[in-house]
Amino acid sequence: MAGSAFDRTPDQNAIVEGWTPPEIDVSRAHSARMYDYYLGGKTNFPADRAGAEQALEAFPHLKVGAQANRAFLLRLVRRLAGMGVDQFLDIGTGIPIEGRNTHDAAQAIIPASRVVYVDNDPIVLAHARALLTSNPAGATAYIDADVRDPESILGHPKLTSTLDLDRPLAMLLIAVLPFVPDKPAETLAQLTDRLPSGSYLGLSHLTADNDPAGVGRLVDTYRQTGINTQALTRAEVADLVPDGWEIVEPGVQILSQWLPDADAPAPDPVHVPAYGLLARKL
Ligand SMILES: C[S@@+](CC[C@H](N)C(=O)[O-])C[C@H]1O[C@@H](n2cnc3c(N)ncnc32)[C@H](O)[C@@H]1O
């Protein structure tokens, strides 16, 4: 067991230094824990930190990019909630961040919002309790599943008892498809197939468009660390959107340029190697 992370036992919901669930392999870097490191979190272990430092050497702006990604997620959720969307399916949730999760942003606008989280990393599962702190007017649930197995998500009893699949919902795939390089468009088509008209799809995806050399090094570093990943062009990201969906304003944009908050300083787009988009089912 690698011991310096602060963790939360699922049983006690207490912060315990050095506690790691036994099923978690901390000897290898993992994307969720490397992302946690970029965001300044403490749920990462020496192998994750070593992998993250290598990635930062390859692409020194990665922390800016990770912050911009999380900020995009929260802006997207606030915008959707502002439009009246009150059901969210957040796939590739990541390690919770206090007060900066999908249900926090959604329920601040619509307290009765219902959110289902999905991730396949056991460390996210170990922290799931922090995602279940719903406003009593709404509901949250967590499903331990793989995005490549849509039926295990859409047919899961926790999903069907939390979300009403006959009403529009927002499916979020924020910074997860780069880790599913094998047929992401097919996966997305299967995931969105049974969503009702009026549903939304929000996604972000790594790109090398603005810095081919730097992001190329980053992708190579992840692969050498054992994490398969890929970057896509703007056109390829747009092509992920399934037939029968339309990309809505402001289109496919570098994350920090997707409806930025007027009062937040926008980082240089070259430092934010990912596109974001919002699409609506016709
Ligand atoms: C970079 S983090 C993004 C977290 C969060 N969506 C955000 O944008 O802040 C990627 C997340 O995707 C999850 N992930 C990677 N591959 C997955 C898969 N095949 N199925 C489900 N989740 C996956 C990782 O465990 C990790 O939590």
Image: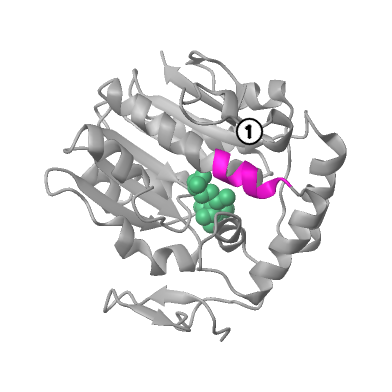
Q: Nearer the viewer, residue 279 or 276?
A: 276
Quarter assignment of residue 271: top right
| Residue depicted at x 28% and y 73% | 13
**Residue 151: x, y in percent?**
42, 46
Horizontal arrangement in the rendering, residue 131 relative to residue 231 (left or right): left
Let me know if residue 149 appears in the view. no
Looking at the rendering, in which quadrant would you find the C terminus? top left
Q: Nearer the viewer, residue 122 or 254?
A: 254
Please name the colour scheme applied to the rendered image. Answer: one colour
Q: Is residue 8 above or below residue 147?
A: below
Residue 83 vs residue 56: left or right? left
Residue 163 locus on image (x, y percent): 25, 40
How many circles with numbers are drawn on the protein?
1
The local secondary structure at tag 1 comes to loop
Q: How many residues crowd mark 1 within 10 Å: few (<14), some (14–19), many (20+)?
A: some
Label 1 belongs to which residue?
A: 267
Q: Nearer the viewer, residue 213 or 271?
A: 271
Q: Nearer the viewer, residue 19 or 125?
A: 19
Q: Which residues are magenta?
A: 61-68
Q: Residue lying furthest left in this view?
A: 137
- Magenta stretch containing residue 219, yes or no? no
Which secondary structure dominates the residues rendered in magenta?
A: helix
Name which residue lies at 45% across and 62% down. 124
Q: Is residue 63 magenta?
A: yes
Q: Is residue 267 above or below residue 53?
A: above
Residue at 71 percent across and 45 percent down: it is: 61
Tell me the kind of residue under disc 1.
Answer: Pro
Image position, residue 250 (x, y; %): 52, 15
